[in-house]
Image (spheres, rainbow, N blue to C red):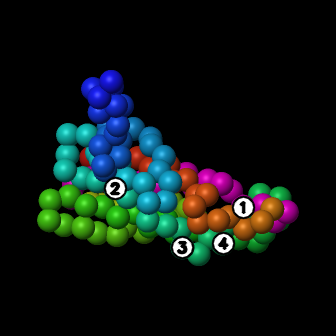
Amino acid sequence: MCLLCVTACESPTGPSVGIDERFTLSPGESARVASTDVTLTFVDVQGDSRCPADATCIQGGDAVVRVRAAGGSRTETLELHTGDSSRASAQYQGYRVTLAELQPYPFSSRPPISDGDYRATLVVSRD
């Protein structure tokens, strides 16, 4: 019974994800990049001004997803943007961390998105 409990538990840093593999994190959740010492933690979303899906907007807006990257003795907060593909990724220790998607998408007919409801889908590739 104890062995089953121990093997069913994930590591304290969360799941391990592979290079070029899409993975989704909730705020506060972490994932370790397999075969590296890099751990990524979804910190929060800043300034979600994305155009609601049920509205017509002149501009698409932007949301900034903050991800803490830690590896070795270096920790850095990356800011990944939804509204500018040139700023949707950032380099960290020879890897590129890319924001593939931020959910849920806002709707003007629904209440504002709570901080804990966000889900960020990321991809890590070799730079």
Residue found at the far left of this picture: 73
Q: Which residue position is annotated with label 3?
A: 46
Q: Residue 33: percent from the left, percent from the top? A: 28, 45
Q: CA distance from mark 4 to mark 3?
A: 9 Å
Q: Earlier in the sequence, mark 4 or mark 1?
A: 4
Q: Earlier in the sequence, mark 1 or mark 2?
A: 2
Which span is picked out in magenta?
A: 93-109
Q: Which residue position is annotated with label 1?
A: 106
**Residue drawn at the location 20% of the way across and 40% of the way down:** 35
The secondary structure type at the circle numbered 4 is loop
Q: Earlier in the sequence, mark 4 or mark 2?
A: 2
Q: Which residue position is annotated with label 4?
A: 49
Mark 4 is on which residue type? Ser
Q: CA distance from mark 4 to mark 2?
A: 24 Å
Q: Which residue position is annotated with label 2?
A: 40
Foreground: 12 or 42? Answer: 12
**Residue drawn at the location 64% of the way across and 65% of the way down:** 114
